[in-house]
Image (cartoon, grey):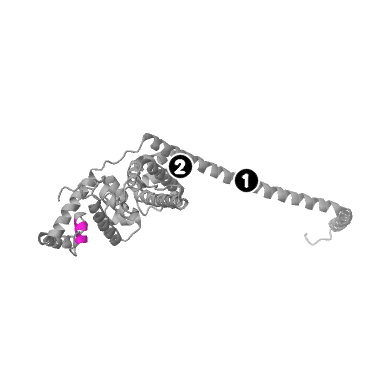
Amino acid sequence: MVKKRGNLGSNNDAQLLRRIRSGDPAADHALVNQYAQYLFGLAYSLVGNSADAEDVLQETYAGAFRGLASFKSRSSIKTWLTQILVRQVARHHRVQARHKATSMDTDLVADSHQNVPSPANIAGAKMDVEDAIRLLSPAHREVVVFRELKGLSYDEIAEVLGLPRGTVESRLFRARQQLKKLLKDYMTYE
Amino acid sequence: MNECEHAQLVSAYHDGELAVALRAEFEEHLEQCASCAAELVYLRELSRLLGQLAEPKISSHALHRLHRGVDEASQVGIWRMARTVAAVAATILVVCGVWMWLLSTATAETGELSQWERSALQQEEFLVAENGGEQLAMWMIEGLTGNNDHD
């Protein structure tokens, strides 16, 4: 069993929310300080580089402060922030995909993703673990990151991603099968 | 690839997500199924590998940017509130202005009619005064003659 690195609950949520809603500016900053590191690590794992992760984080907090009035405390602040971050990451991926499509349409860049190894050309090569995660589809990457890097339970992943638990389970299974192929040179058990 | 029909359960077992009853049953299966046992070893190895990934630290610059963003967001909130209050005040001012203007127009209109109205009002006042005097005179006569029913 994997040792959990953290979960999504927090006892200070209600108190922090009260302070933010009463207009205490220090509470706004406390919200940033409390979750920025966790969210940055998550964003980095999902988008693959620091610059984009910082942008995603900035957008996440901007969205959070905009929507704070409508936050109903049905989930923890951490879960709520994570859900916003996941949406921002999805938006980031859509923008990236559009840029890529535009580049290919205009044929300005002959091979814009020369630096990104494809599963075909990395076969047999020693694969960096982070690159392997990056090669997964966004849907598979999400579940792997939440489970393996953040230690969330299946139910917590389902809540954050808004998916049925069974879908989380099957995505995780398929993602791990894909990682098995990508990381075969790293595995010491064979 | 694990061809066993229970392959997906290995993942759930590894993650500690199997119900207790199912867990015991699956452990029995693991003792007999080599491919599931191998799959479990693989998953443990994978978790070990992924667990070695260092979590990147957020830079102080990025944290500073976040705090600045929070301050700007609250400034925007204050400005938005100030704009709303100003808009409400301006609306009240305009409504009051229009109302005052209408009132003064009505008063001016009353002034234009005053020539005939004033004479009518004067006649009215005269009649009231005259009738009032007549009534007073009647009470005085009744008092002097002692012709009243109060005694």
Task: Give left or right: position of B7 versus B91.
Answer: left
Looking at the image, which residue is at 25% across and 58% down?
A: A173
Q: Quadrant of the C terminus of chain B?
A: bottom right
Residue beneath disc 2: A23
The stretch of residues the image draws in magenta is: B7-13
Residue beneath disc 1: B89
Looking at the image, which residue is at 23% across and 53% down?
A: A181
Q: Position of residue B35 (x, y in %)?
A: 15, 59
Kindly identify the amino acid type of the residue bearing the numbered disc 1: Ala
Label 2 SS: loop
Kindly identify the amino acid type of the residue bearing the numbered disc 2: Gly
Instruction: Name the one closer to the observer, A86 or A184.
Output: A184
Figure check: A25 above or below A148:
above
Residue B137: quarter of image: bottom right
Instruction: Name the one closer to the observer, A161 or A15.
Output: A161
Q: Is residue A7 at least partly visible in the picture?
A: no
Q: Quadrant of the N terminus of chain B?
A: bottom left
Q: Which chain is disc 1 placed on? A: B
Q: Which chain is disc 2 placed on? A: A
Q: Position of residue B51 (x, y in %)?
A: 23, 45
Figure check: B43 above or below A20:
below
Q: Residues within 10 Å of mark 1 (few under 14, many from 20)?
A: few
